[in-house]
Amino acid sequence: MSTTRAERAASTRNKLLDAAIELFLDKPYDEVSVHDLANAAGVAYGLVAHHFGNKRGIHLEAMRQIARRIELGPPPPGPAGTRIRQLLGDLFASIQQNPAAYLGLMLSADPDSRAIIDSSKQLAIQATGEILDLDPERPVVRLAIRSWIAAVNEAAVDWLQGGCEIPADDLIEMLLAPLGELLHHAARIDPALNPASALSAIRGRHSWARTP
């Protein structure tokens, strides 16, 4: 059965994109040429421009595909404490399945990658605020959650690079402790903020959570 022109074009595009993902995860942007991409995909040089415009275009699409590999949906409805733990659990399960994709994004200095990471952080801020019933538009809340997410990402990179030696459940509980402290101090800066229910939700088996 013969393939149509559209099917052949889609197949070529997918080959190029698969090659780009592999190459850009292995090398910095400046060390990958259009010839490298075409050779790895087994297609003509000019097809990179035909399908993606230029090297920057295929790199951006490759980074988007990499980000989708570790993209998380919102945890199902339930108690806030359960949901915040599931959010972290889903993250660690996803990056364990796609370690190269996660490390490639997190450790990249390329502006395309940074823009994608920043977009993901904004979604994570919104999701955390929704779970804990806190308004991320409130400056102290946004700063507290953003700082915590940065800590989670740094811990996840170290965890992966260290061979995931710490059980994920223990890592989750360890990472919830600084979130509680950040929210506690946020309430001192903004006395109108009442994070008591959020602190109760994330306390779990910790004894550190305090009523502000």
Image: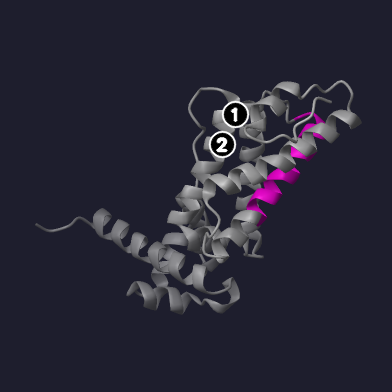
Amino acid bearing label 2: Arg
Q: Residue at x 54, y 61 (%)?
A: 160
| Camera-side residue of 203 and 196 | 203
- Relative to 167, say whether 78 is above or below: above
Mark 2–mark 1 CB contact (< 8 Å): yes
Count of marks placed on residues: 2
In the rendered image, which residue does mark 1 sit on? Answer: 81
| Camera-side residue of 59 and 142 | 142
Q: Residue at x 67, y 30 (%)?
A: 129
Q: Is residue 70 left or right of residue 81?
A: left
The image quadrant of residue 51 is: bottom left
Residue stretch in magenta: 137-154
Circle 1 SS class = helix
Q: In the rendered view of the protein, which quadrant contains the C terminus?
A: top right
Circle 2 SS class = helix
For disc 1, the neighbor class at 10 Å (few under 14, some 14 to 19, many from 20) is some
For disc 2, the neighbor class at 10 Å (few under 14, some 14 to 19, many from 20) is many
Residue 125: in magenta span:
no
Q: Is residue 7 left or right of residue 108?
A: left
Amino acid bearing label 1: Gly
Q: Residue at x 52, y 22 (%)?
A: 78
Q: Residue at x 45, y 57 (%)?
A: 98
Residue 104: x, y in percent? 55, 63
In the rendered image, which residue does mark 2 sit on? Answer: 85
The image quadrant of residue 208 is: top right
- Relative to 201, say whether 122 is above or below: below
Q: CA distance from mark 2 to mark 1?
A: 6 Å
Residue 139: in magenta span:
yes
Q: Is residue 139 left or right of residue 26?
A: right
